[in-house]
Image: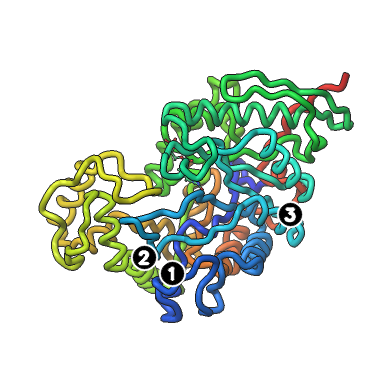
Amino acid sequence: MAAHFPGVNNTTVWSADPFGRPEDVLAAENGTAKPGARRPGGGPARHPFLGSQIDFSSFEHLARTAERGLFDFFFLAEGLRLREHKGRIHDLDVVGRPEALTVLSALAGVTEHLGLAGTVNATFNEPYELARRLATLDHLSGGRAAWNVVTSSDAFTGANFRRGGYLDHADRYTRAAEFLATARELWDSWTPEGEQRPFAHRGRQFDIAGRFTVPRAPQGHPVVIQAGDSAEGRDFAAASADIVFTRHGTLEAGRAFYAEVKGRLAAHGRRPEDLKIMPGVTVVLGDTDAEAEERAAVIRRLQVSPQNAILALEQVWGVDLSALDPDGPLPDFDPEPDSSLAQGRVRLADPLATAAKWRALAEEKGLSARQTVIETTARQSFVGTPAAVAAEMAEFVAAEAADGFILVPHVTPGGLDEFVDKVVPLLQERGVFRTRYEGSTLRAHLGLGEPAPPRGT
Ligand SMILES: Cc1cc2nc3c(=O)[nH]c(=O)nc-3n(C[C@H](O)[C@H](O)[C@H](O)COP(=O)(O)O)c2cc1C
């Protein structure tokens, strides 16, 4: 069951995404690994908090730490094509990311309570196959599976797939909605009593009929997460998801997003508490505020190396800027609007406006090109002592900016330990976080109801 604020019907929930940021941050900080030295599937031996991105031991450490911290779930993102920059794989990107549901199935064997959430694309898969895999994970884990439904309208990623492509941008949620509805029809083709009946789905995206092979899952339907910020994405979440994973990480932006998305639920016959809003956040701790700030500044500088600053500028300007001095001023010309220089990354919607904003900031504060990138792109949510961070997180929930958070650690696999050891006890003291798991399923941890079971004949 989720923890509740006394007298307030808010839910504080926690989860973890270990691959949200490149872990080169501490590799570089400890001087044990250079970003350029990274290899697919791992990297050089380094700090005890740093390890392979693919060895099972890394996943096991993160998941066990999340479970020790009584988190709701462990979350894995998905990347279906390595990002390229000027035709090269950029060495600050996560390279060699394993497939989420396979990893989570293995983690089901070494955890007992922790929810297991995997990102799987609804543009490139088929409902029958994916519904089977998710129902299987739910069975293997005793009701702890979640699916983060993402979409892709990007030809670069689509080229990896047999349909030879991708969907038109306008169709990405049409297919996702029909995909999810079809998966739910398959899950509902078995009653909890074990009665099985044929299914038939005739729609624009899928036309399938038959019998589903996996009996009804412990949660009925795995928990559904949505991550996409457009009006269509928000509406898809309001109609069909249990959780929204968002990037709105400041109190102000979080409150606006929270009110907007919760406001969409009534039109779908749902209550505000039926959809949990969880921003992805980072945490930097220190024994004093000054120490935390100092550590945060080190991390920001490492994340935006001179090379990475050029990459960020090229993503906005859309042209080769390798000759630019990162410690000098921003380019003095306007961006190229239709560039395909960086592939697999979302290019900012309006590069001209971004460039204008960055120039104004650089001028106002007297910043170099690299300093401007550090100021505008380094995303750090909670920086401070454990007590200050616990207070600030509690405030976010009380102020209706979030129902909980997806923690994005700076390092794999040790990036959650400090939070679990130092912040979780303070949240518990405040009475805003559970002191033990009370239910056994992820739906129970989140305070979500179960879908109505199909009736037997
Ligand atoms: C917080 C967040 C996390 C996301 N994580 C993933 C991911 O792990 N894998 C992926 O392929 N897309 C991911 N996406 C991309 C979305 O699925 C979607 O393609 C993108 O946001 C564009 O949709 P939109 O126009 O509705 O925002 C993520 C998006 C957001 C906002």
- Hey, what amino acid is under mark 2? Gln
Residue 110: x and y in percent read: 75, 62
- Residue at 52% across, 52% down: 394
Residue 427: x and y in percent read: 58, 58
- Residue at 47% across, 27% down: 171
Ligand 1 closer than 8 Å to the CB at disc 3? Answer: no
Residue 108 quadrant: bottom right
Q: Secondary structure at mark 2?
A: helix
Q: Which residue is mark 2?
A: 303
Q: Earlier in the sequence, mark 2 or mark 1?
A: 1
Q: Secondary structure at mark 1?
A: helix
Quick one: quadrant of the C terminus?
top right
Q: In the rendered view, how is the structure colored? A: rainbow
Q: Which residue is mark 1?
A: 24
- Residue at 61% across, 52% down: 100
Q: Secondary structure at mark 3?
A: loop
From the viewer's perspective, is residue 364 above or below residue 181?
below
Residue 121: x and y in percent read: 55, 41
